[in-house]
Amino acid sequence: MTFATRNIGAARIGIALIVMVLYGVAVAVLVNVEIPQANKDVLMLLLGNLGPLMGAIGQHYFTSTPRRNQP
């Protein structure tokens, strides 16, 4: 494993954590705060766009596909 490979792995984990935090904050705001009607559509669009990203994160980290050994 090279230095660049480790950095890419760390970046993927960092991006995954950021997406999960954004999704959690958006859901928490939706549940706990009274949102003006003009801003509710924007929040729903954010949740709609972060949902597939959460699925892609789960697919990447929790599928059981074997990794190829790189020379």
Image: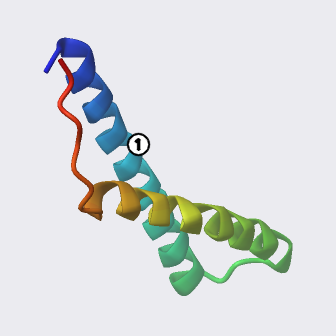
User: Looking at the rendering, in which quadrant would you find the C terminus?
Assistant: top left
Q: Residue at x 48, y 76 (%)?
A: 28
Whether residue 42 sits left or right of residue 1 in the image: it is: right
Q: Position of residue 40 (x, y in %)?
A: 76, 75
Q: Position of residue 45 (x, y in %)?
A: 73, 67
The kind of secondary structure element at disc 1 is: helix
Q: The residue under label 1 is which amino acid type?
A: Ile
Q: Which residue is mark 1?
A: 15
Q: Residue at x 47, y 66 (%)?
A: 55
Q: Residue at x 26, y 33 (%)?
A: 10
User: Looking at the rendering, in which quadrant would you find the N terminus?
Assistant: top left
Q: Looking at the rendering, which quadrant does residue 36 occupy?
A: bottom right
Whether residue 20 sits left or right of residue 1 in the image: it is: right
Q: Position of residue 5 (x, y in %)?
A: 25, 22
Q: Closest to the observer: 11 or 45? A: 11
Q: Is residue 6 above or below residue 22?
A: above
Q: Closest to the observer: 56 or 19? A: 56
Q: Is residue 44 above or below residue 46?
A: below
Q: Position of residue 52 (x, y in %)?
A: 57, 65
Q: Residue furthest top?
A: 3
Whether residue 34 sits left or right of residue 70 in the image: it is: right
Q: Residue furthest right?
A: 38
Q: Looking at the rendering, which quadrant does residue 41 occupy?
A: bottom right
Q: Closest to the observer: 1 or 18? A: 1
